[in-house]
Amino acid sequence: MQFLGMYHYWVFVMLLMIGFYAVVAKVNLVKKLIGLSIFQSAVFLLYITMSKVSGATAPIFQKGVTDALFSNPLPQVLILTAIVVGISTTALGLGIVVRIKEEYGTIEEQDIQEIDRR
Amino acid sequence: MTVLFGVFLLTLLVITAVAIVRTKNLFVAVMLLGIFSLLIAANFFILDAADVALTEAAVGAGISTVLFLGALALTSEYERHATPHRWLSVVVVLSAALVILYATFDKPAFGDPNAPVHQHVAPWYLEKTPEYIDIPNVVTAVLGSFRGYDTLGEVFVVFTAGIGVLFLLSAPRSGKERPRPARPELVAIGLREDLIPRVVGRLLVPFILLFGLYVQFHGEYGPGGGFQAGALVAAAFILYALVEGEGRTLQALPQKALTALMIIGALLYGAVGLAGIVLGSEFLDYSVLSADPVSGQQLGIILIEAGVGMAVTGVLLSIFHAFAARDEI
């Protein structure tokens, strides 16, 4: 159990850094947004990992069961709304990328900078 | 057993993420991102977050994939350039990773009931939900009532993002203006000629819609609510659009109706909040909506969840149509 707990945190770190790498290193704008999505998912995973209580169940009451132990509902609420907000902001980013492609004819960062310098 | 399953899923997640970043083909990356979302949804489910898993599966694996594909159709499918300054990036990322890894050793043990996160308001929510609101799903109670302000803010962020996409993608292209096709519904898009997608799609769409409505109205009793239902209903219409083409979908549910859904949904939420003030209490206090405070709370949650569902459906479908319409011009 101890190992699984640390493993959750380490997977969070790995996913966060894979997403971070895609955002800073890749020059393709769509790839950057994909990296941002992975980065975002890593944060979601961290929150949900923290909401877990050993031996507990999902925070939904059942009739007749009074001694059930529940996981923490609060991080789940925060992440539930964050997922939908995340897709909306990703869509906004994609909209901007499409407009950049139409104006510059490319979505590679270097090419865009070169066109701007001219 | 669950431990093994958890480790397996988490390892798959990392492998998928590495594959996404390494591939040069953006189409492959987007497909893998869909798989990544499904895997992380399974992880959320193991971690007792049924509502979050449902949302991630509907939004991440369904709608986000379609939106990325829509954007790829308008841009390009391949990364052209090799990564410049790759080693500099690797050094930066690795040093950040080391710092965060070091911090994880100070984190409370996994599943520890005495962790600080479980000591603050969460026990209060679990204890008081039966008394104040009396619905089984605590997540819905916290989302709709205890933290109604947060959710109102999130709905308006979604709304604003939808407006933003409509603004960006409804602007005419500068320079090269191509004539619109005379009868857009005749343009060969969609999979109408293919038998299997057509039959399967037609069979599935009503059931997805029905499931969306179930998730909407059963959100107080089981996993579900407006955010999930909105994503599911939007997914049903997107599937219909992929099978039958844009024109038919816009006939069934025109853009004006979608814009109205967005606005009415967001306003309904705000109006329920204001009703609390008018009836002599505070903003977003639903207890005064009915003679009995508990049934007032339940009524308020049903109304705001309906508002959330409408707003999310409207925004996601408007965004989808905005990308798809750009394709046609």
Image (tube, coloured by chain):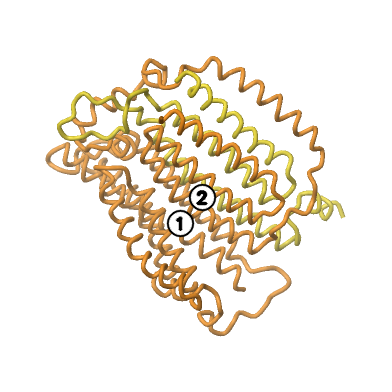
Chain colours: A yellow, B orange
**Circle 2 is placed at which residue position?**
A88
Q: Are marks 2 and 1 in contact (CB under 8 Å)?
A: yes
Above or below — where is B179 with respect to B285?
A: below
Looking at the image, residue B10 sits to the left or right of residue B221; the answer is right
Q: Which residue is mark 1?
A: B315
Residue B168 quadrant: bottom right
Q: What's the residue type where badge 2 is placed?
A: Ser
At x 52%, y 21%, the residue is: A6
Q: Residue at x 28, y 53 (%)?
A: B214
The quarter in which the C terminus of chain B is drawn is bottom right
Q: Nearer the viewer, residue B196 or B84?
A: B196
Q: Identify which amino acid the numbered label 1 is placed on.
A: Val
Looking at the picture, tell me which residue is in the foreground, A69 or A2. A2
Packing grade of label 2 (10 A; few <14, some 14-19, many >=20) is many
Residue A109: x and y in percent read: 76, 49
At a point 32% along the width and 26% down the height, the residue shown is A56
- Looking at the picture, do discs 2 and 1 lie on one chain? no
